[in-house]
Image: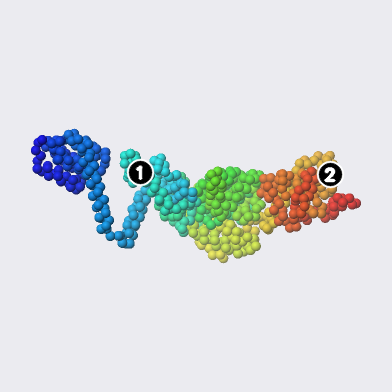
Amino acid sequence: MAEIPNDLQATLQGLQNELSQADNPRGHWLATLERCRAAGLRYPEGADSIAYLARAIADATASRADGQALRDRLHKATGASKRWADELTRERGRDLWREQQAAEVEQTANRRPPSPAELEAQRQAAVAERQAREAAAPFRVLGWDAQRRRIWFQHRETAQISAINPGPSFDRLLPLGPLDYWEATYPADRRSGGVDWGQAVSDMAATADRAGVFDPQRIRGRGVWRDDGRTVWHLGDRLEVDGVEMPLAELESRHHYLRLPALAITPAAPPLSDVQGQQILRLIERMGWSGPSDHLLLAGWIVLSNVGGALRKRPGLQITSGFGTGKSDTADNVIRLLQAGLGISCSGSTEAGIRQSIRHDVLPVLVDESEQADGNRREQQLRLVRLAYDGLPLVKGTPGGEALEFTLRVSICLAGINAPIANPADLSRIAVIGRRQLAAADWQQLAEERAELLTLATGEALIRRTVSHLPTLLANAETMGRALAAVTPGRGGGRVGDTYGALLAGAYLLESTAQLSEQEALEWAVDEKGWDPAAPAADEVDRSPTAEARQCLDHLLAHELSWRDPDNDRPSTGKITVRELLDLALRSGGGEAPKALGRCGLKADPERGLLVVNGGAAIGKLFSGSKWSQGGHRARLLELEGAEPVPSPQRFPALGSARCIAVPWDLLEVDPSQLKAAANAQRGCP
């Protein structure tokens, strides 16, 4: 064996200490091995010196695979046995472990417990580190769903909101951020693909725990909102907050503004002037209306509809007019233009269709072809107006057993030829207006003026005016509401104030942006505009507590049945109403009329009154498709004065015995002498 230089011998003897201080222990070990090879150090003659290198493998690397690679290099360079080298390496590894454990025990024994201030500093540092990591993420965790199955998040760059079912899966987490973000934030070894997905999911779940349960009702779509005293105009791809534009995700709020297609509007458009607004109001007034204040209601609704999400109450509007009198013209050439084309239009749509068109938006909605003949569909549309008026949630069940909640905060206009509103509760929320035809010459001149004044640009200017003066509009709506409620006692003044006060405040904003006092509000609405506070809805519907009971009875009496009088050969229509059949049964005292009534679950009892069975298929046909179907008529009819349940079952011709209620004849305005004659006929008296 060649003689080993003294400096190399010293290096080998102090190699372990040198490796503990080296910046690159593995490289330093390899350099020492190269010096030994160059000096001709071979095994077994130089085993004592080579042993230093074998033991130092444990100091050069903690990786088992890398340790075996160094052992192989040692074997090739010096001829040292692999088994011999492995044994020396393991011995040194055990020594290192014991030294490390002893050092930790000594360090723990000598370490004083941290003070409360130090513990708080450590906690704050950990919180700051976590917050910095979360702020640097390309997404913001919003919280769990109520069932703790999905985590909601908002992408910072796009502001899109979605939910994922968390799991250690590349496919699930990658849409939240690019791969380089995950590799840099959660690095892992090569066998895990470079990302510690398990730790990533764990951190995301912990962040969701801190955020709590996320309420999807806090997601907001396009349109105008109020947010903690601020006016927020959601333009689809950005926000305008109190007149200043900003990205969607930058607003500090408990609400979340969802990224959607941008609205086709220029928010920086010049606002409508007072003079232009007054011109619009005068022009609409000249269009021909059924009522003296219809133009105010239309103009007010249009102004309110553009900022529906910011309103406390959202009055509905019903346009009812005959064929060819201007219903569609009003929608196309007035409403649509003054909404800058942003409104959602649908025709004869179902409740589900309208809701799916609205989604999270608070843009105005116009439902055309809303006809009474559509029955259940029409009732669904009216229900949506009721819900939107108060901003109440609509809760629907799902096949999965979870309730789906949907909140409407939109202004809705219904338009139809045959579209009466009979329910007093609806009439207090919906303003009813109608068009009348103008003379051809008057209409031609008006149409030319309107085409010049009412454009999409005019609509943009009106919306800009409304958004800029939204606090004034809201204040005037409250003031006008209080003023109207005070002068309409006994007519549901509170609801009247909420509905018509808001509409008149909207119309007033066209003329002026001044804030009104209650006296000024009444002077403008009543004295200047001729508003009649005694009959704001201009309808003739009974609003008494028994109104619906009377409607139920009228529905029953007006129902038509197929009929051919066997005692009369003269031609007839082949139809007869229940009221006519009752009259015929009382006059005849027998024959086919009582049997026909019996087949419907009815009986003309001269002494008790009109007997109506409580339920069953017979009476069900008369109320099918109405809100009194499936036995609902009984509770309503019992609300009529004098109506009462009959104690025992009564026999009905052609039907049999059944329990029933009795409606007194005076409610049907039957001649008492006719009843007396019918009673005598039943007793066999002359």
Quarter of the image for residue 69 reads top left
Quarter of the image for residue 167 reads top left
Q: Is residue 510 left or right of residue 52?
A: right
Identify which residue is drawn at 23% across, 47% down: 96
Residue 154, numbered circle? none
Residue 97 location (% of width, % of height): 25, 47
- Which residue is identified by label 2? 591
Identify which residue is drawn at 39% across, 40% down: 170
Residue in the foreground of this view, choosing between 303 and 482: 482
Identified by mark 2, the residue type is Gly
Residue in the foreground of this view, choosing between 397 and 405: 397
Instruction: Using a 10 Å C-alpha cutoff, classify the residue at mark 2 as few (fewer than 14 neighbours), some (14 to 19) or many (20 or more).
Output: few
Q: Is residue 574 left or right of residue 35?
A: right
Q: Earlier in the sequence, mark 2 or mark 1?
A: 1
Residue 637 location (% of width, % of height): 72, 53
For marks 2 and 1, give the CA distance: 90 Å
Q: Height in image: 669 above or below 372?
A: below
Residue 267 in view, yes or no? no
Residue 612 location (% of width, % of height): 75, 50
Residue 196, numbered circle? 1
Mark 2, secondary structure of its residue: loop
Residue 128 location (% of width, % of height): 34, 55
Identify which residue is drawn at 33% across, 62% down: 116
Residue 617 in view, yes or no? yes
